[in-house]
Amino acid sequence: MSGNNRTGMNILHAGIGLGMKAIKIPRPVLYEGPGSSDRLSGILETEGRLRPLIVTSPGTVQREYFNKIKDSLLENRLEPVVSATVSEDPSISVIKDIARMYRDEECDCLVAIGGGSPMDAMKGAAALIARPGADIRGMKGIMKVGKNTPLMIAVPTTAGTGSECTVAAVITDENENYKFTVSDLSLCPKYAILDSCLTVSLPKSITAMTGMDALTHAVEAYLNTPYHKADTAELCESAVSKIFRYLERACNEPEDLAVRQNMLKASFEAGEAFTVACVGNVHAIGHGIGGICHKPHGLCMAVLLPIVLLDYGKAAYGSLAKLALRSGVLEDDGSGERQTGLRFIEKIRRLNRIVGIPSEFEGLRYADVDEIARRAVKEAVPLYPTPVTYAEDDVKRVLSIAMGD
């Protein structure tokens, strides 16, 4: 990018950052701790809601904890309706069906129980409920939904996406194999419940990938300094500290509730941070891979994060060194910003290896690289205030490394 273009981009990001500081980003009322999902009935009663539509996945409804939650609602004379149709990467058609069920069943609020996909599906349905008859594709981007979304409560069962506290939903257009984001202040759930008891049955692979997703949120938000508010850096540092301390243990000691609770809180903190500061090129490239090649989102984040950070080079070393030291991941050995930044990137690679995540992708097709690059640049530029603004050739270089070339 030329100097003039870079200067123009910096001015744009500075202006958006000033706007971000002026906007009050909503934060959910938080209930946390083992067993906190027992509070759901009380929340609904306090809100005067009788008939929640529970948005979840086919696998989640088979879990013992789901039946316990549902039975508790019934015992408190509530009338839950269940939509268990959400699979990975919620599609437009599934979201339309959820919104239709909400209206047909005369529900009065939405509750998502599950990982990022059910939570995003809930938000997408809420957008359609707020704007009946609208095409959700037309809400792609920022602030195109409005204020009439129903009450939303998020109960995450994975520690990674942070969707329980963000204003965004990632939706898949199944006809175009394309992921897009709908962002609006009205899409932040009013309540979030972080109950580690709901995460102990997660397989190690999902625990690992969702944890690396949370790490990517925190690192990318930390690098996007033009958008930071007063507490953004601190949230990122806290999340990174927890993930490096607890992710390996969560994979190997899955029933340790304290470990699981810390991972849920790390995911929440990272979610709050990137709601303000946005994500970056790792997510932009990963969304392209996920939409076209249907790779799990957390896997995309884990593989791409160290590659992109190393590719940023000197533009990111200072911030990475600061993050590594302030989060306690590294001690200051006096080696300077570059070496500390490189050591931090190697710590990320090592964490990937420890939790069983590969360093490269398998099965990506060279025929898809051009389209992935086009989509990544379209997503990231000019909104994301990344240390390096990528062109399509930059994305292709990163993909080549990620494919083992």
Image: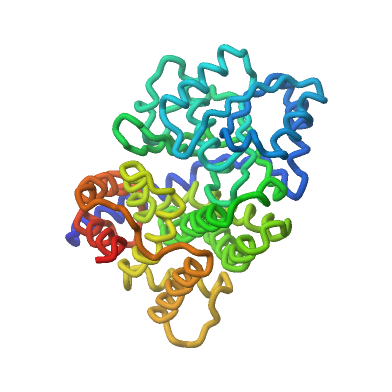
**Which is nearer the eye, 43 or 119?**
119
The picture quadrant where one finds residue 92 is: top left
Between residues 374 and 147, which one lies in front from this camera angle?
374
Whole-percent x, y for residue 266 in the image = 60, 56
The answer to whether one can see residue 140 in this image is yes
Colour mapping: rainbow
Figure check: 40 above or below 127: below
Q: Position of residue 99 (x, y in %)?
A: 51, 20
In this rendering, the answer to whether 102 lies above or below 369 is above
x and y percent of residue 202 in the render? Answer: 61, 50
Residue furthest to the bottom in view is 334
Work out which quarter of the rendered image holds the C terminus and state it: bottom left
Q: Is 199 in front, or is 269?
A: 199
Residue at 41 percent across and 57 percent down: it is 224
Q: Which residue lies at the image location 72% right of the left edge and 33% below the top edge?
A: 67
Total label count? 0
Q: Determine if residue 230 is in view.
A: no
Looking at the figure, which quarter contains the N terminus?
bottom left
Residue 404 location, x and y as percent? 28, 65
| Residue found 19% across the figure and 48% down from its top | 367
Would you say 375 lies left or right of 26 here? left
From the viewer's perspective, is 202 left or right of 370?
right
Along the horizontal axis of the image, is 142 left or right of 48?
left
